[in-house]
Image (cartoon, rainbow, N blue to C red):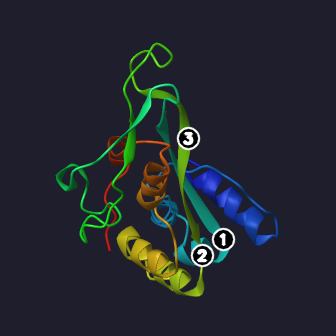
Amino acid sequence: MRDFETAESAIQASLTGHLVFSTLHTNDAPSAFTRLIDMGVEPFLVSSTVEGVMAQRLVRTICGECKEAYEPLPSDLPTDFPGVSEGNFPKALYRGKGCRKCRQTGFKGRTGIHELLVNTDDLKELVVQRTNANAIRIQAMKNGMITLRQDGWRKVVMGSTTVDEVARVTSADIA
């Protein structure tokens, strides 16, 4: 959705009982609400028709041929990386050395990181009040939403991607 007319059509279809899927360009899931309102859709319509928002980003995956473990230094890790502030972070993370298979990049392929925001009564109230996306994000996180960055950190710990790659495509979570 890029304009009011398209958004209005989707809202009307939703109000008449249709299940509507659409793409919307935003930085994260909570921003979808404010984006629709900025496009001219009334907040009460946004809050009552949007059931959920999935945000996604692609990160490069570590090449399986040249993947190696290394011990990260605390100073090399962002402060929001799990366990950094307590000094209890993984002692082994992974990176690609670079090989012929990956053309010396250390990466081969991509995988997604995701953020799913499920609309709840408390979020609907914030939307109707025209609350900013940060406040919506904070409440969604209290409700259990896993952010793009948190999902990225999971993939780092699993050895799928690197700290730098997640830091490159996400911003630090506010809360």
Is mark 3 in CB contact (under 8 Å) with mark 1? no
- Residue receiving disc 1: 51
Towards the viewer: 47 or 144: 144
| Label 2, residues with CA under 10 Å away: few <14, some 14-19, many ≥20 | some
Distance from the alpha carbon under mark 2 to that under mark 3: 26 Å
* In the displayed structure image, the side of residue 119 where residue 101 appears, left or right: left
Q: Earlier in the sequence, mark 2 or mark 1?
A: 1
Disc 2 residue type (three-letter): Asn
Q: Amino acid at mark 3?
A: Thr
Q: Nearest the camera: 70 or 17?
A: 70
Residue 34 vs residue 61, the one in the foreground: 61
Q: Which residue is mark 2?
A: 119
Q: Earlier in the sequence, mark 2 or mark 3?
A: 3
- The kind of secondary structure element at disc 3 is strand
Question: Which of pointers 3 and 1 lies earlier in the amino acid sequence?
Answer: 1
Mark 3 vs mark 1, foreground winner is 3
Q: CA distance from mark 2 to mark 1?
A: 5 Å
Disc 2 to disc 1: CB gap under 8 Å: yes
Name the quadrant of the C terminus: bottom left
The answer to whether residue 53 is left or right of residue 63 is: right
User: Considering only vertical position in the picture, is 143 above or below 166?
Assistant: below
Residue extending furthest left? 75
Residue at 55 percent of width and 81 percent of height: 124
Residue 140 % position (x, y): 48, 76
Quarter of the figure with residue 74: bottom left
Residue drawn where x is 45% and y is 28% of the image: 107
Tell me the number on the disc at residue 111. Answer: 3
Looking at the rendered structure, the kind of residue marked 1 is: Glu
Indicate the position of residue 117 as horizontal and vertical percent values.
56, 68
